[in-house]
Amino acid sequence: MTRQKRSHHRLKRAVAPYLYLSPSLLIIGLLMLLPMVTVIGYSFQNSAVLRRDPSFAGLKHYQAIFADPVFWASLWHTLYFTCMSVVFHMTIGMVFALMLNSDRINPTLRNILRVLYILPWLFTAVIIAVIWRLLLEPNGVVSSVLMQMGIIGSKVEWFSSPATALHAVTFANIWAGYPLFMVSLLAGLQGIPKDFYEAADIDGAKAYQKLIFITIPQLMPIIISISLLDFIWTMQVFPLIWITTGGGPIYSTEVLSTYTYKLAFSSYNLSQASASAVVILLISLGLTLFYIRYQKAR
Amino acid sequence: MMFRIQPTMLKIAAAAWLLGATSAMADTTLEFTQWWEPELPAGSLRAIMNDFEAANPGIKVTLVSGPYATTRDQISVGAATGTLSDVVGLDGAWVNNLNAQGALADMNPMMDASGFDKTQVADIIKVDGKAVMFPVASFVYPVFVNLDLAAQAGVTKLPSTRAEFLEAAKKMTHADKNQYGWVLPLSLQTPSGVQNDMMSWVWASGQSMMADGKPALEGKPVVDMLTFVKSLNDAGVISPGIATKTEQEKVEEFVNDRIGMMIDSLAHVNLIRKRNPKLNFDLIPVPVVEDYSGKRGLPYASWGIGISASSKHQDEAWKLVQYLMSEKVNAKLVSLANAFPGNVNAKPDFVTSDKAFGKAFEIFKTGYLANEFTGLPVAEDLMTQFDVEAQKMLAGEQSPEQAAANAQKGWTAKF
């Protein structure tokens, strides 16, 4: 092989991986990076999108949203909604996964429960919102049942009262999201070697001790990975809150996603909406980096 | 056999091509973006466009149709990028923003140049003196009364004043049976309840929420309206769930015999009949303050029309606007939409064939169209701000005066 041919061959080998990657890079660039960079750019412009010659605004829009008490209320609601959702998703998912993995339950009943427990996962956010709006309306089934049981004395406006609305939307989201944990943990449970439990039995370990010292440590990688992903996804939930409460009553269920939407499509303040979107991006990015570092460490 | 092309044939072919090419070049294609086509019977708007094309040789119309929300976003983006369609369907709530972007053409010079009779149109929406929109079809908002519930409650005379309305609503309310006198949708998802179900009380009495083009929410008309709504809420006559109730849910409750009275669009008459054919209801104007005998303002939503400032075919676009606003075509369009006409001389056919519509048409003719949100900057945002303050008032967190003052503060900042 001549020197020229060898050099050509080396070049081809060096370029080939990039050529294979190029379709993915192009798609990521066009569909993710470009919109992201554009939105970041808008957040530094006055009258972004609405004017053909927007002027540079510096950090003005960031200052405006940080000075807005509704933004801070939205941030707090987002954190409450997300943390409660993740904790309950994990707890309910774990309980149901243990139940479905248990030999003490009749296999037929277990299969029926498996289908029932996974049902919320099959519904879209809009259907879930409609279902819970119907169930939790003051004249709905939930109020009626609770009144008959004597738990509440009068009809409760679950979504319409500032005192209960945030808890009600969080509850609906918990109901909608636990199957992800349940399925992942069930897969994890089925992968734990039986020997561990047999050894624990020989040592006389009780059920709760086996749970604390074998099951949970074995599932920990799954729990952390899914919790982080759930945290990122739940932080961005929009349709469920928008359809059930629209961010109200007053601002009691306003979260960062509804706050940003209203800035963009109700106030037509796309510059501030972009600044708010960048804040959400930064929070999500922080969590994502944490997730990636955790995955690498494993 | 050899086929020889004769020079004459070549000449004919060249002439035919030239004729075709020049006629193609002479054709102007107008783009018309609106949300009306999906809401009209299939093919009916296209048929009207075909008639227009036949009456105006050389002009073709391409309809760009989509749902309301999509059209709104499309128009916002088109205005920003200078790609707005030649003719655009408009909602009054959008025009201020679009005008601020310089996206809408002033139709005053076009009206003057063509000798357009301005008295034939119900309204011309102007921003900064520019005529930017005509309401083509108007959907007025009267009060729907469930006559069976009224009769059961002993309401023999349908209310014409606010005091009578409160009394009738009290009589029709039986919370134990999930039956209420009135329904108020104040969901922040679609804050149009502020316009249709709250401010309509102000406009009905010939009053205004504005003064000299600026918000006047702390004035007597708005404070009185808020006090009245609060009195209805305190009396427990409003169906629960106000803060998250949407317009669709309001109609649904009325259809299900649970609401005595509601303010709603006339466009829903057929829907209500379809959902509950047995529902016995009547239409009345929105009640007024005591001793008011002047003309009543009728809250309305409309299908408006305007011309893009960046259109290269403004003369042809104006022809299309004129065509849709003309007496016969307008009557045809609004008959299809079950709406009231933008041309005052047009008479839709349903007003003679349908008793309810006939009655509503009488209300329409004796009153005047009133919607002060039309042409205001960020109208939806203003409604959201007022909505939040009204919700705080209904939750007992503030008085009507405080609600009005806080809303005024928020609105002033937007102006």
Image (cartoon, coloured by chain):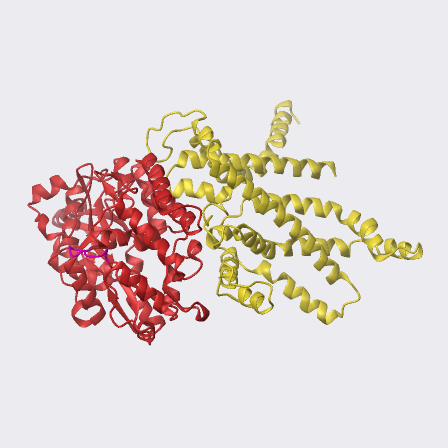
Residue B67 visible in the shown view:
no
Magenta: main secondary structure: loop
Q: Is residue A80 above or below residue B259?
A: above
Magenta stretch: give its range: B288-296
- Picture residue at 12% right of the left edge, 39% below the top: B109
* Closer to the camera in the image, A204 or A215: A204
Rendering coords of residue A212 (x, y %): 81, 50
To which quarter of the image does residue B344 belong?
A: bottom left
Rendering coords of residue A249 (x, y %): 46, 50
* Closer to the camera in the image, A197 or B51: A197
Left-right relation of A148 to B81: right
Left-right relation of B1 to A200: left
Left-right relation of B3 to A229: left
In the picture, which quadrant includes the N terminus of chain A? top right
Rendering coords of residue B175 (x, y %): 43, 67
Residue A228 visible in the shown view:
yes
Rendering coords of residue B4 (x, y %): 18, 51
In the picture, which quadrant includes the C terminus of chain A? top right
Q: Residue furthest top?
A: A3
Q: Is residue B377 above or below residue B63?
A: above
The verdict on residue B290 being magenta is yes
- Picture residue at 79% right of the left edge, 66% below the top: A104
To which quarter of the image does residue B364 belong?
A: bottom left
Color of chain B here? Answer: red
To which quarter of the image does residue B264 belong?
A: bottom left
Color of chain A here? Answer: yellow
Left-right relation of A49 to A162: left
